[in-house]
Amino acid sequence: MPGRLVVAAFALLCALPLPAEEVLYQIDLVPSGKSISRGLPTLKGAQYVYHEFPGGTLVSVRKSSVKAITKMSPKAAAAVNPRTRLVRIGDLAFQGPRSGGSGGGRSTTIDRARAAVAAANAGTASRTGQ
C-alpha cells in the first residue's frame, strides 16, 4: 500500500506543469528606439498592447509607431534581463566617523565639517551681536 502512494505521488508531481520560460519580443519603434515585451503584443484597433519587460507595465503603442516586432533569441533575452546581469558583492565595511569623534589623532571628514559649521556659526553670531 505505501508503495502505491509513493508511485501515485510521483505521478502527480510529474503531471504538474513546469514553469514556462518567458518569451520576449523586441518592438522597434519609428523613427528610433525599442521596447521589450513579455509575450507577443496584441493588436487592438489601431494600437499594439503589451506588457513591458521587466516591470510588467501595460503599454499601448500606435500601430503607425511600430517598425517591426521580432522574437528575441534566448541569448539576446538573457542579455537584456536584469536578473542575469546582477553581480553579488561581498559585505561592505561601514565607512563613517568613529564613535566619540576621536580618530586616534586623525582628523576625519565629519570632524572637519563640524569645525567648518562651528566657525560659520561663530562668524554669524559676532556679526549679529548675539
Image (tube, rainbow, N blue to C red):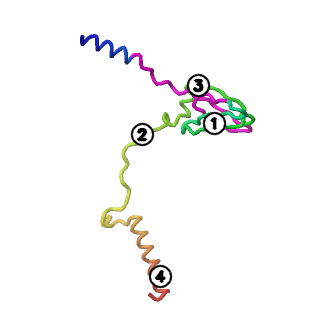
Q: How far across and down, in percent of the image, does residue 72 sit?
A: 60, 27
Residue 124 inside the magenta-drawn segment: no
**Element type where label 3 sits in the image:** loop
Q: Residues within 10 Å of mark 4 (few under 14, many from 20)?
A: few
Separation of marks 1 and 3 at Cα, in angstroms = 15 Å
Local SS, label 2: loop
Task: Mark 4 or mark 2: name the one nearer the start of the chain.
Answer: 2
Residues in magenta, as a range = 14-42
Callout in the foreground (1, 4): 1
Count of marks, rendered view: 4
The relative height of residue 121 versus residue 54 in the rendered view (above or below) is: below
Callout 3 amino acid: Ser
Expressed as whole percent of the image width and height from the top left, the position of residue 76 reads 58, 29
Contact, mark 2 vs mark 1 (Cβ under 8 Å): no
Label 3, on which residue?
Answer: 73
Q: Position of residue 14 (x, y in %)?
A: 39, 16
Query: Which of these two is toward me, 39 or 2?
Result: 2
Q: Nearer the viewer, mark 1 or mark 3?
A: 1
**Based on the displayed image, in which of its 4 quarters is residue 23 positioned?**
top right
Mark 4 secondary-structure assignment: helix
**Quadrant, the C terminus:** bottom left
2 versus 89 height, above or below? above
Indicate the amino acid at tag 4. Gly
Q: Which residue is at a point 41% across and 73% down the rendered structure image?
A: 115
Q: Is residue 24 magenta?
A: yes
Q: Earlier in the sequence, mark 1 or mark 3?
A: 1
* Residue type at numbered disc 1: Ser
Query: Which disc is residue 88 wearing?
Result: 2
Question: Which residue is denoted by mark 1 in the rendering?
Answer: 35
Badge 1 element = strand
Question: How far apart in space, not on screen, are marks 1 and 4 (Cα)?
Answer: 57 Å
What is the quadrant of the N terminus in the image?
Answer: top left
